[in-house]
Image (cartoon, grey):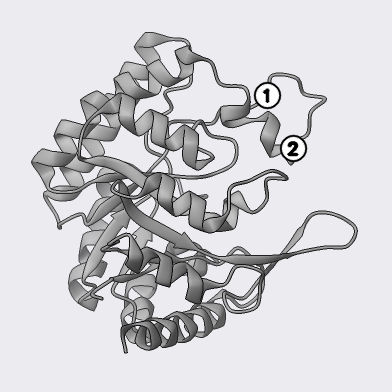
Amino acid sequence: MGWPVIMHVNYCEQGQSLREICFKAVEWGFDGVEFRRKRTGVEEEPEAYLDALAEAVQASGLKHVLFGYPTANLMTPDAGEREREVENAIAFYRSARQRFPILLCNAFSGPLLNPDKNIPYREYQKQGSGIATEEHYQWAAEGFRVLAPVAEELGFRFAFELHMGYLHDLPASAAKLIEMIGYPAVGANLDYGNIIYFPERPTLAESIRTLAGRLYYVHLKNSVALPTGGRLPTALADGEINHREYLRLLVEVGFDGPICIEAPRPGDREWFAQQDLAYIRSVIRDIAA
């Protein structure tokens, strides 16, 4: 199994510079980093961001660059705004590709939240696909039918993250959207660490089977249910999701990576990155043996 192991940038969003992030990821043994299209809390032009990132990637020897949130907000009824969102995304990816190869983009079609403000966000089944209309699917599909050929031209693929509050929050809705788009450059990013927050959800095996063939990426994180309700994020090895079984199931469907680990909990995330990486590398070695 030659799965590249990717570090989500949220392990290093506690004041670290782009240069520090790249050097630390390489030192710890990651194959790449999933960066955001815009840095959280930093006001800068895209060109300045990409110039700084390119310098850090080259200096550190980081193998792979991926981009994640945001992609394009396609959930607005304003067709002109949706078109501008797509144009801005294309401009960013073209500019990035001039500086370094892009392995993959973790895709989002824009937040889709319940207009009833009395319904809390944590009622995830009442957000995203739970309130979606056919029009929402059409808006997302139209936008990604423009984005997909650009990804093919630039040599990368989009993978919709299964994330609460989005049209593509569960395997069935993500699969429907991918089929509507109809381009090989667009598939899914299975984040079962998000799906587990839904009160009614498919099993891990069912989720993988639903997306098999268009499963281009996975996010790995973990949590445990609290007796009082809700969930507590944990280390990758310590929660309810058995990642050893997760990776075995991926092997069965011919998944060829990459895989990304995340830091959903507060504290010393630099230490968490090394701890979680050691665990998942160990699991990969055992499965490959």
- The image quadrant that residue 225 belongs to is bottom right
- The answer to whether one can see residue 37 in this image is no
Residue designated by label 1: 114
Residue type, label 2: Glu
Q: Is residue 238 above or below residue 187?
A: below
Q: Which is nearer the eye, 252 or 285?
A: 252
Coordinates of residue 285 in the picture (x, y in percent): 35, 87
Q: Residue at x 26, y 52 (%)?
A: 104
Residue type, label 1: Asn
Q: Residue at x 28, y 71 (%)?
A: 3
Using the numbered discs, state the Cα–Cα distance from disc 1 to disc 2 in whole angstroms.
10 Å
Q: Is residue 245 above or below residue 90?
A: below
**Quadrant position of the C terminus in the picture:** bottom left
**For residue 283, which numbered disc appears in the image?**
none
Coordinates of residue 97 in the picture (x, y in percent): 15, 49
Would you say 273 lies left or right of 44 here? right
**Quadrant position of the N terminus in the picture:** bottom left
Q: Which is nearer the eye, 8 or 211?
A: 211
Q: Which is nearer the eye, 41 or 13?
A: 13
- Disc 2 element: loop
Dots 1, 2 in contact, CB < 8 A: yes
- The image quadrant that residue 255 belongs to is bottom left
Coordinates of residue 122 in the picture (x, y in percent): 74, 41
**For residue 123, which numbered disc appears in the image?**
2
